[in-house]
Amino acid sequence: MHLSDILQENKVHFSFEFFPPKTEEASRALFETISELSPIQPSYLSVTYGAGGSTNELTQNLVIRLKKETPLNVVAHLTAIGASREEIKSQLERYTAAGIRNVLALRGDPPKGSTSFIPDSNGFRYAAEMVAFIKKYFPHFGVSVAGFPEGHPETPNRLQEMDYLKAKVDAGADCICTQLFFDNRDFYDFCERCELAGIKIPIIAGVMPITSLHGLRRMSELALGVHIPGKMLKALARLEGKGSIARFGMHWATEQVRDLLDHRVAGVHLYTLNQSRATVQIVETLGLL
């Protein structure tokens, strides 16, 4: 089903993000996780790349396997880094043959150890160029693009940042899925900026439940620019070595999602870290299962 059709359905939209496992054991565990999440009836699942497109083949294989073995809608990540136009075209042809109809078009993060984006000589400099390419040559695909509620780390000028986002929308994007955030006020401010920029497509809010301090630190390294509220840091400091970080993380995320639903958000995208427990508890607590 096309993204625009999915998001027009009159329901609470939840979507879940996974990363491709690298071992057979991890693959079995992931499919058990997906089975545990299926009763929530997510609007779609998305599968990410590693930095610099490092898990490209694993991502493609997992996306196609999910399409074959589950009844769920799947959104495949596409990144411009390390990929030529021909390679992106080949991926889209493979997805088309497998019956996959939705992608998330990203410029992508540089490979580990690199600090700057260097496009392929025959690749895309910006995500907007990729969106335009997909809509021209593969118009049957639904295309999601990334949004940054706290600002893109490489674009400190917030007005210019919105110009870049509007370019992706004007190129044909069907929805925006945001990077994770911990303070809903940042998301609402972002939505107001989108409204002022004339952006009218659905905006999906990205939420990640904290499960450990290690995971939080790792996330801070990967999701550059994400700000951790002071009151969250205070609570974590009180809990360290004394209480359950995971329980606190689920409570924080649950309150985020409750508030987002009260504000009639278009959808909530949960970064699962390939685990089901936190996601299921959030949905159960809100009475949505």
Image (spheres, rainbow, N blue to C red):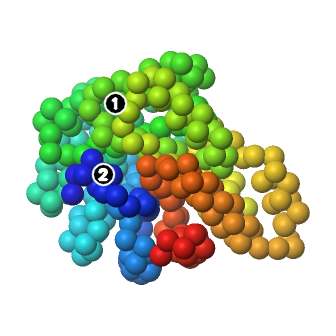
User: Which disc, if any, is residue 169?
Assistant: 1
Question: Which element type, helix, strand or loop, lies under badge 1?
Answer: helix
Q: Is residue 19 left or right of residue 67?
A: right
Dot 1 amino acid type: Val
Q: Splitting the image into 4 quarters, where does residue 15 fall?
A: bottom left
Dot 2 amino acid type: Gln
At a point 58% along the width and 39% down the height, the residue shown is 188
Q: Splitting the image into 4 quarters, where does residue 124 fall?
A: top left
User: Which disc, if any, is residue 205?
Assistant: none
Q: Nearer the viewer, mark 2 or mark 1?
A: 2
Q: Mark 2 packing: few (<14 Cα in 10 Å), some, or many (20+)?
A: few
Query: Which of the two labelled residues, at mark 2 and mark 1, occupies the earlier sequence position?
Result: 2
Depth check: give the residue in front, 227 or 201: 201
Q: Splitting the image into 4 quarters, where does residue 287 fall?
A: bottom right
> Is residue 85 visible from the viewing direction of this image?
yes
User: Which disc, if any, is residue 8?
Assistant: 2
At a point 60% along the width and 34% down the height, the residue shown is 189
Question: Which element type, helix, strand or loop, lies under badge 2?
Answer: helix
Q: Mark 1 packing: few (<14 Cα in 10 Å), some, or many (20+)?
A: many
Q: Where does residue 75 sit, x and y in percent of width and height? A: 31, 55
| Callout 2–callout 1 Cβ contact below 8 Å | no
Q: Where does residue 107 sit, x and y in percent of width and height? A: 39, 35
- Quarter of the N terminus within the rendering: bottom left
> Is residue 118 visible from the viewing direction of this image?
no
At a point 21% along the width and 37% down the height, the residue shown is 134
